[in-house]
Amino acid sequence: MLIIAWELTAACNLSCQYCRASASHEPDRDELDTDEAKRFVESIAPLKPMLILSGGEPLLRPDLFPIIRRAVSLGIRVSLASNGTLITTELAEKIADSGVSRVSISLDGADAAMHDLGRGQGSFEQATKGIENLRGRVDFQINFTVTRKNQSELIRIFDLAEKLGAAALHI
């Protein structure tokens, strides 16, 4: 299966210490507009990929759901990669209704003490609340990047993923 990971926006509500996407609080001026984004989706549809929409934080993009709906209407399997902090009950319903097949939430530790070190105070609580809001509506997975600081968390993050009902744990 072909997988396309698209950093849909640079905008993000967090300022993670190690962000590989160089995210900022504002979208990048060179991001595709809605029509361009839909044309991009149409151009990849013949490849029958799985499309992972990430960022930054893709949930900050105002036209996210029209882009998702266009991709799904073309038979593309769509996943979201999110920090989870913005996922309210209402947004979880909207995600499920749009046809997203899975949401990945990044956690850097099995508790706030470890996770919040790199992502900001309160981000663990917000992310796990986002996960709770997704539960029963759309599959979710937990992404965990192993670092020197959190390598001792591996067993605990596995246990947390099971407890939360994650469909997968990607390390």
Image: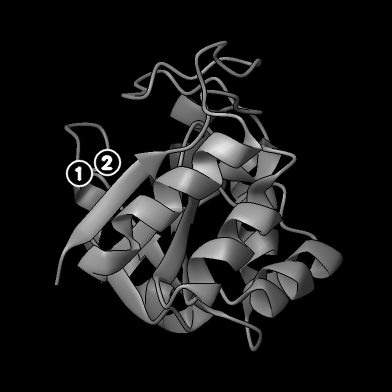
The colouring scheme, among rainbow, by chain, secondary structure or one colour, is one colour
Residue 14 versus residue 24 in the image, above or below: below
Residue type at numbered disc 1: Val
- Which residue is labeled 1 in the image? 146
- Which residue is labeled 2 in the image? 150
The answer to whether residue 88 is left or right of residue 105 is right
Q: Residue at x 41, y 44 (%)?
A: 40
The answer to whether residue 81 is left or right of residue 123 is left
Q: Residue at x 82, y 69 (%)?
A: 89
Of all residues, the one furthest to the top in this rendering is 29
Residue 159 image point, x, y percent: 35, 75
The answer to whether residue 132 is left or right of residue 83 is right
Residue 24 image point, x, y percent: 56, 15
On the question of residue 106 being in view, the answer is: no
Q: CA distance from mark 2 to mark 1?
A: 6 Å
Q: Residue at x 43, y 78 (%)?
A: 166
**Marks 2, 1: nearer the viewer:** 1
Residue 161 versus residue 14 in the image, above or below: below
Residue 4 image point, x, y percent: 26, 52
Cβ atoms at labels 2 and 1 below 8 Å apart: yes
Q: Residue at x 52, y 28 (%)?
A: 32
Residue 137 image point, x, y percent: 66, 84
